[in-house]
Structure formats: structure tokens, C-alpha cells
Amino acid sequence: MLLITFHGGSSPGINNIYAYDTVTKCCLNQSALSQPTSGPLSELRAMVVANGYLYVANGAKATSNVLCYQAQSSGNSFTYISTVIGPTLSKKGHFETSISHPFGIALNGSGTCYVSNQDTNVVAEVTLTSDGQTGSLGTCCQSAYLNKLFPAPDVFLDGTYVASQQGSLHDVDVTATSVPASDGGLGVTLDNSGKVQNSVRDVAVANGFLFVCDEPGSAVNLYSLADGTFLGTSNALSGKPTHLEIQNGGLFVSAGSLLYWGELPPSGSTAPPSLSLQEVALIPPSGNKIGGISFDNVTSPSAPTVYIPFQAGTGGADGGSIYTYTVTQSSPSTLPVLSGGTEFVASGSSTFQDTPEFVLYVAD
């Protein structure tokens, strides 16, 4: 089964998850998520299966939370269990903690969840309860590395694990400490009104590292999961990185209309980690931007299928499409080869009515 989130927002945006049968390519459910009690679904982004649950980033400013769902017996419907974490708002409706417009979610397998937030330009560290259903933010900065470099009276938003190069941002009440790029601060660009235009995107966890898309910086940053130490960046990319996916010892990066791959730095190495990203050859339709990809490692483990969403715009009659490719690799340390490029045709239509953001393959 393939789950899809869309750009969403106001009508005709799609603000629920579509579930598709990957064999018949038919839509199984256009409202796979039940409505949460904490507010509406709007601008859904990352999806992660962990702890027996489906976690979903509910990204619109008015919602700004991470939701926890459990699969029903049908398999293509999910029941709302809880809100894992949400925003703290001032009387003015401004944000007071790091949770704001969440985009990416990554779990470390030991009770910690990392959430990237576009409007605060911060990656938050969320401590999950033992049942994985709810979480909490620590007070101020959660990175021992940043606390050593910027001790009190420096100020950080609650839950901050990776900070912003610009600490004072629109719609955020707390004026946080600005962390330079050399210390791992994330780039941010503003529009003419001063609101955040481009900022942090997806996050991923592997081998003791936290990988973060610095979209304005055109690179992927590396941090230690142990203490938040900034470990450097990847090589500069031609496109702006937005989405990450771990597969077979490598990191795939969506950057504009380009797809990159790099071998993961090994865990436990005493040498400084490095991440060298190379472009993966594929034939995207019309050069559209690439969203969050997902792999089927079950049907054919030696030559898995990758589902790649192509984004034609932000809604309308042609929001985009999804293609499938077969992935082959002579070894985990060699550049993957993608072949096929077959359009994933669903319900007789080759396009969606809204822009696909993330896809997630879930074994039936």
C-alpha cells in the first residue's frame, strides 16, 4: 500500500492521506486518517511508521502538531490516537516554542523524535512517553554542543536541538540566539514582509547522526545524536534539498528536480564524518520538483521499487504525478541505478488534483 500526503490548505487542497493499492494502482481510501480531536487536518507532510503507529506531521500554522495514528483492521484506515506534540502560542497567536509549521519527522528508536519546523527554522527534540503516543519538549536548548558554545544568558526556544542562523523571526515571540553557519545554524530567507520563505526541511536519523536539509544553504547538514555537535555539511547541491530517505546504507536527497545519493558515514568511526552526494540519473516528467520518496523493500529486496512524487505545482487540475523505478546497486557503497520510470496511474487518472508532498510504502 502507498500512502500519500498533499500540499493541502484551502480548497481545493487535499488535507487527508490517500491510500493506494500498489498492485492494482487503485485508490483504496481518500480519507485514510480519522479526524483528530485536537483540531483539523491541514497541510500534511512527513509520515513515519514506528512503535506500531503512524506518525504524521500536521503542518499548517493553525495546527502545527505531530499526530499519532493506529491502523484499523482494514489496513487502509487509521484511527487517531493522540497528539504527540503541538505548539505553545502567546495571546497574540505567536509561537513560543520550537514547534511551528512542522515538516519532517525522524525517530532514533530509543524514545526520541526529531521534528523540523519551518517557521521557527529549528529542529526540535521531542522526548516520547514509553507508549510512544505523546511527547514533551525540554526547556530551552537540548543540544549540549550549543549550550557549551552559547551559555546563559543566550536564549533558545524550548526543544531546540538544531538552531537557526537568524533567531528573531516573524510570528515567533521569543528572540532566540542566532547561531552562525560555522556552528551549524540553519539558513533562512524571508519574503518582502519579513515572513519565513525558505528554511529547514526534512530530517533523517542513521548511524548515530542527524541529517538535516538546509534548503537555503543548498546542502545537507550533519549533527551528532549524542550531543548535537555540528559535524559539517555535504557538498553543495545544484538544487535546494527538501526531502531525505535512508535506503541500503545510503541517503537519498530530493533537491528541486534532481535526486542525489550518498553513502552514509559509518557509525562509531573516529574519523570526521563526510557526506558526498552524487546525482542519480532518472527521467523526471517535465523537470518537475521531486517530493519525499519511499522504497518497497519487501516485494523485491534485491531490486526494490522506489516511488517518486513529481510536483507540478501547488494545487489545481495537475498537481503532479508519481512514478516508480527499479533500483539496482552493485554494492551498498556504489551509486544506485534507477530504471523503468513507469507512471503510477491511479483510478484512471495520471495526475492528482493537488501536489503530492510525501509518499510512504507500507507493507500489507
Image (spheres, rainbow, N blue to C red):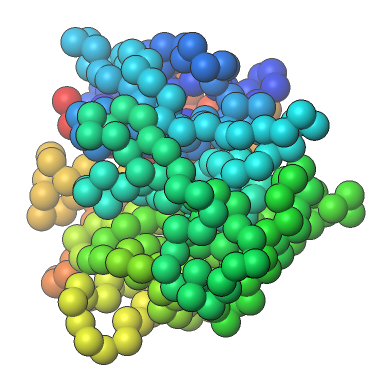
Q: Is residue 213 visible?
A: no
Specify whether 201 is left or right of 295: right
Specify whether 171 is left or right of 285: right
* Rendered location of residue 179, percent (x, y): 62, 71
**Residue drawn where x is 41% and y is 30% of the image:** 84
* Rendered location of residue 208, percent (x, y): 26, 66
Q: In which image quadrant can residue 28 be found? A: top left
- The residue lying furthest to the bottom in this view is 271
* Rendered location of residue 253, percent (x, y): 42, 61
* Quadrant for the C terminus in the image: top left
| Of residues 237 and 215, the one drawn nearer to the viewer in this rendering | 215
Does 137 sit above or below residue 338?
Answer: above
Does 126 sit above or below residue 7?
Answer: below
| Of residues 263 and 226, the one drawn nearer to the viewer in this rendering | 226
Specify whether 233 is left or right of 194: left
Q: In which image quadrant can residue 245 be found? A: bottom left
Q: Is residue 126 visible?
A: yes
